[in-house]
Image (cartoon, rainbow, N blue to C red):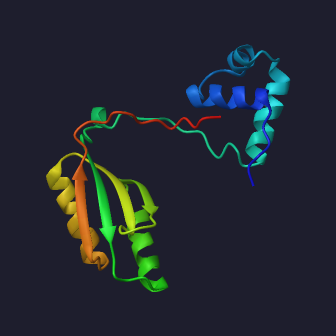
Amino acid sequence: MPARLDATDRKILAELQRDAAQSLDEIAKAVGASKTPVWNRIRKLRERGVITRQTVLLDAEALGLEACFFVLIRTSEHEPGWQQSFLEAIRERPEVLEAHRLAGEIDYILKVRVPNARAYDRFYQSLIAEVRIHNVTALLSMEEIKSTTILPV
């Protein structure tokens, strides 16, 4: 069930998404409220699970992770044991930034960040050695046009 948010909650969330390192004073000023009520709202948003965590965004290319692959996976295996093995294999690999189970012809899509094509091949080889996959298609992103973690609030 979606959380009920008023205009001030939404402004606070927008500010936190823009830059969570801001001081409480800066956030309060930006949303037109005083510090204590803003702090209380942030605390309540955390308690309600609207704010799940705070983190830092890193530049992948600055870290040498220049290749982004979208990996389309089709499987002929749909029993719980296979799925559990697959999910564990995906979750333990740090190069997998996102993994989604899909409706349609493709069963899963992964977003994988690695230094280059050789590193992707090592990832691929280790994955198929661990779990049986019917078909894998890897698509190399030539250009990132838009990437954001900011949700429309």
The residue drawn where x is 80% and y is 20% is 35
Q: Decide if residue 23 is on the left or right side of residue 126.
A: right
Residue lying at the far left of the rendered structure: 118
Given residues 94 and 81, the one toward you in this image is 81
Q: Decide if residue 29 is on the left or right side of residue 102.
A: right
Vertical arrangement, residue 50 with respect to residue 22, above or below: below
Vertical arrangement, residue 64 with respect to residue 121, above or below: above
Location of residue 10 in the rendering, given as x and y in whole percent from the top left corner: 71, 31
Residue 25 visible = yes
Location of residue 29 in the rendering, given as x and y in whole percent from the top left corner: 73, 13
The residue drawn where x is 70% and y is 20% is 27
Location of residue 67 in the rendering, given as x and y in whole percent from the top left corner: 23, 44
Q: Decide if residue 16 is on the left or right side of residue 101.
A: right
Question: In which quadrant of the rendered view does residue 132 lie?
Answer: bottom left
The image quadrant where one finds the C terminus is top right
Residue lying at the far front of the rendered structure: 104
